[in-house]
Image (cartoon, rainbow, N blue to C red):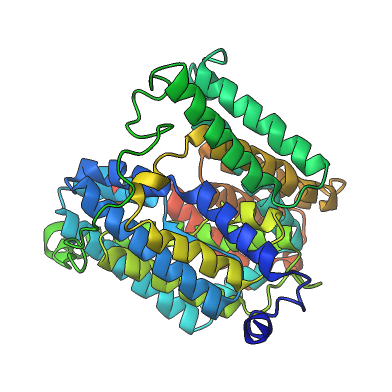
């Protein structure tokens, strides 16, 4: 135990083994949905559900443990939502690649990002971000997490111009409200493991109501959710491991292939940068210059996770914003990530049990995490429009576009332009100019493809 404490610097970071375990379990509970959502999305690309579930759990488990052991921070990794949709609906659905070729694109962008990490470029970009935008990124991620929670709960659904209120009188939404109130009460009473207790209590309550009073109809459209599992153990299927190909170069042509890799790379690159900054700010890891000590280790593991996700056919794996749930429970070291990773590896064999958790149970925890993360908004100087406007665009851009990358892009471009047009160019780091230019290309990628005939 002493060696464990020393390696992960548990005492130095003001934590305990118990707190780290609770934090790791909480993060897993809020992320477990990816075990079933990822196979559903990649199923549109023709991949088999059980096989994708296996590689999803495997990649998440191995890379999260690696993040804990090497990165030494409570950041968990799993196949990224959004990136898997690009694989299924753009690379395979629209551009006609095979699933193996699409995964080849993922492997390539992961290798490129790894090279950028090893050469110091990725960390240089992160360090060049002004503190005001780092604070805004943290707040934006908090709002984004809260929106994800409301959507997962069914409290808000697509409708009208943007979104509208869902069926707030339905059983699942009522369960979400109960879980949200319970989580907030436990948090206000400073109960240790408040989010984990709320998730477990809401899950058990949902199962009892579903089984005893509603004949299993509460989540009829979601097989296995909110029901006592018929089977607890299932055998993993590793058939997709290593099933990737670089044949996309011949099929898309050099220009088309480069643009496909660039688009994914930029999204992956800044998604992780934003997530890491937001999580580090929430946990109090950033130093007085807004830098995360040991960030090179975190970025290296994350970049290798992208390669692993493509090689494992689970789509690009990346650091998850749901790690904030464990951090909110007090997790401060890599031991929490090891716990989360081990649970993902267990899920290789007990996926039916993990599938019992209703999305409304974890949705309540995500909304609470969003509430906790938005506190950093007080640190933004709202008196200076050249700082405040980019911060505002960053923090609202993430939930409104449903994309961390898009929110960061809006903030970067507006920050550079406002500083330039108000005679304050000296305040802009050179890497911010490069990043802003890359985002201009990113936002205009479709017209650029049209002009180039790609």
Q: Residue at x 70, y 80 (%)?
A: 9
Residue 151 appears in the rendering: no
Residue 369 appears in the rendering: yes
Return the residue nearer the eye: 117 or 70: 70
Q: Quadrant of residue 324?
A: bottom right
Q: Residue at x 48, y 77 (%)?
A: 300
Left or right side of 432 for 62:
left
Expressed as whole percent of the image width and height from the top left, the position of residue 190 reads 81, 47
Left or right side of 324 for 213:
left
Q: Quadrant of residue 225?
A: top left
Expressed as whole percent of the image width and height from the top left, the position of residue 46 reads 16, 45
Tell me how many marks there are: 0
Rendered-image quadrant of the N terminus? bottom right
Q: Residue at x 74, y 46 (%)?
A: 372
Whether 147 is drawn above or below 77: the answer is: above
Residue at the far right in the pictured view: 383
Expressed as whole percent of the image width and height from the top left, the position of residue 141 reads 62, 48
Residue at the far top in the pictured view: 169
Whether 368 is drawn above or below 344: the answer is: above
Return the residue nearer the eye: 449 or 149: 149
Whether 358 is drawn above or below 277: the answer is: above
Return the residue nearer the eye: 342 or 88: 342
């Amino acid at each position: 135990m002493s060696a464990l404490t020393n390696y992960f610097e548990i005492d130095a970071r003001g934590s305990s083994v118990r707190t780290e375990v609770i934090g790791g379990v909480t993060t897993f509970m809020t992320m477990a949905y990816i075990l079933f959502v990822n196979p559903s999305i990649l199923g549109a690309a023709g991949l088999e559900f059980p096989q994708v579930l296996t590689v999803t759990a495997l990649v998440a488990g191995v890379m999260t443990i690696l993040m804990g052991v090497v990165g030494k921070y409570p950041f968990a990794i799993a196949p990224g939502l959004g990136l898997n949709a690009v694989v299924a609906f753009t690379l395979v659905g629209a551009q006609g690649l095979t699933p193996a070729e699409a995964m080849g694109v993922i492997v390539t962008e992961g290798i490129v990002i790894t090279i950028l990490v090893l050469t110091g470029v990725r960390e240089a970009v992160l360090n060049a971000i002004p503190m005001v935008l780092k604070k805004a990124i943290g707040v934006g991620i908090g709002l984004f997490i809260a929106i994800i929670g409301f959507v997962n709960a069914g409290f808000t659904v697509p409708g009208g111009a943007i979104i509208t209120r869902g069926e707030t009188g339905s059983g699942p939404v009522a369960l979400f409200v109960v879980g949200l109130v319970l989580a907030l009460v436990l948090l206000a009473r400073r109960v240790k493991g408040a989010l984990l207790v709320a998730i477990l209590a809401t899950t058990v309550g949902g199962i009892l109501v579903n089984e005893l009073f509603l004949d299993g109809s509460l989540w009829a459209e979601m097989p296995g959710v909110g029901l006592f599992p018929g089977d607890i153990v299932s055998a993993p299927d590793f058939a997709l491991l290593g099933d990737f190909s670089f044949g996309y170069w011949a099929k898309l042509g050099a220009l088309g292939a480069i643009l496909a890799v660039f688009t994914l790379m930029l999204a992956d690159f800044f998604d992780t940068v934003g997530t890491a900054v937001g999580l580090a700010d929430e946990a109090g890891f950033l130093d007085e210059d807004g830098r995360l000590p040991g960030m090179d280790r975190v970025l290296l593991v994350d970049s290798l996770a992208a390669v692993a996700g493509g090689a494992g056919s689970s789509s690009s794996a990346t650091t998850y914003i749901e790690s904030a749930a464990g951090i909110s429970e007090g997790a401060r070291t890599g031991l929490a990530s090891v716990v989360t990773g081990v649970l993902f590896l267990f899920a290789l064999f007990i996926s039916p049990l993990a599938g019992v958790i209703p999305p409304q149970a974890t949705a309540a925890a995500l909304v609470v995490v969003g509430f906790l993360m938005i506190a950093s908004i007080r640190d933004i100087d709202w008196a200076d429009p050249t700082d405040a406007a980019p911060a505002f665009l960053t923090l609202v851009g993430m939930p409104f576009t449903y994309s961390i990358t898009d929110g960061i892009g809006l903030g970067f471009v507006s920050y550079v332009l406002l500083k330039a047009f108000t005679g304050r160019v000296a305040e802009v780091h050179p890497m911010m100019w490069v990043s802003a230019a890359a985002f201009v290309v990113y936002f205009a990628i479709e017209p650029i493809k049209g002009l180039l005939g790609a």
